[in-house]
Image: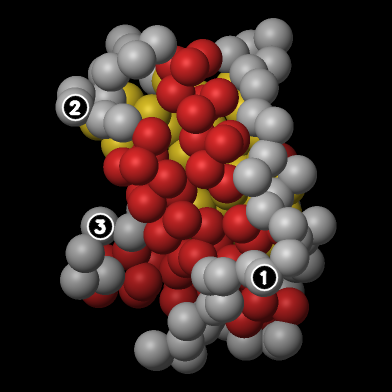
């Protein structure tokens, strides 16, 4: 693997955005002005970590339903698509995933990031539309004809 700085820079070229690491060695992307995705190297430098702050969840039955459906989705996913979790301090549904750095290049990182963002966007859209989970087979638009992928900033 190239060094992480170079890999993030190369990823930026693929997505059409200027990507840089911050002081904490993480890169934060804003997706369609809806939520943020953070990419960073784990402390062992063996994995690239992804975190999406999918949606803030108001207290009540709706949040309970979302969390229940998130647990079901974690259990029933046919292929590894990240793990949905709840951060109580921020009242937020989050999506986590990782990618082993062994043999990684910008194309592999791009493809994995794209799938990760699609899943996060699917959940975000469902919650915004008052659903506790996305419909089975629901696929968010992954191509943006104007500007960078998913409106990344």
Residue 57 visible at all: no
Residue linked to disc 2: 103
Quadrant where the image shows the C terminus:
top right
Quadrant where the image shows the N terminus:
top left
Q: Which mark is residue 100?
A: none
Which of marks 1 and 2 precedes in the sequence? 2
| 3 or 2: mark nearer the eye | 2
Packing grade of label 3 (10 A; few <14, some 14-19, many >=20) is: few
Residue 121 visible at all: yes
8 relative to 51, above or below: above
Q: Which mark is residue 145?
A: 1
Packing grade of label 2 (10 A; few <14, some 14-19, many >=20) is: few
SS state under label 3 = loop
Q: Residue at x 62, y 81 (%)?
A: 126
- Residue 143 lies, in percent from the top left, at 56, 70
Which of marks 2 and 3 precedes in the sequence? 3
Q: Is residue 21 left or right of residue 117?
A: right
**Which is more toward the observer, 28 or 78?**
28
Packing grade of label 1 (10 A; few <14, some 14-19, many >=20) is: few
- Residue 40 lies, in percent from the top left, at 50, 25
Q: Residue at x 69, y 9 (%)?
A: 23
SS state under label 2 = loop
Q: Which mark is residue 80?
A: 3
- Residue 92 lies, in percent from the top left, at 67, 54
Q: Is residue 13 left or right of residue 19?
A: left
Q: Is residue 13 left or right of residue 23?
A: left
| 2 or 1: mark nearer the eye | 1
Alpha-carbon span between mark 3 and mark 2: 19 Å
């Amino acid at each position: 693997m190239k060094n992480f700085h170079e890999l993030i820079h190369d990823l930026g070229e693929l997505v059409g955005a200027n990507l840089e690491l911050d002081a904490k060695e993480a890169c934060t992307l804003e997706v369609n002005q809806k939520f943020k995705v953070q990419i960073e190297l784990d402390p062992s430098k063996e994995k690239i970590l992804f975190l999406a702050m999918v949606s803030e969840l108001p207290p009540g039955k709706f949040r309970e339903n979302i969390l229940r459906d998130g647990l079901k989705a974690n259990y029933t996913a046919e292929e590894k698509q990240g793990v949905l979790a709840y951060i109580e301090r921020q009242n937020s549904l989050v999506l986590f995933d990782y990618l082993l750095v062994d043999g990684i290049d910008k194309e592999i990182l791009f493809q994995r990031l794209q799938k990760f963002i699609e899943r996060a966007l699917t959940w975000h859209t469902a919650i915004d539309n008052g659903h506790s989970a996305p419909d089975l087979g629901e696929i968010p638009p992954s191509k943006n004809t104007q500007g960078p992928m998913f409106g990344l900033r």
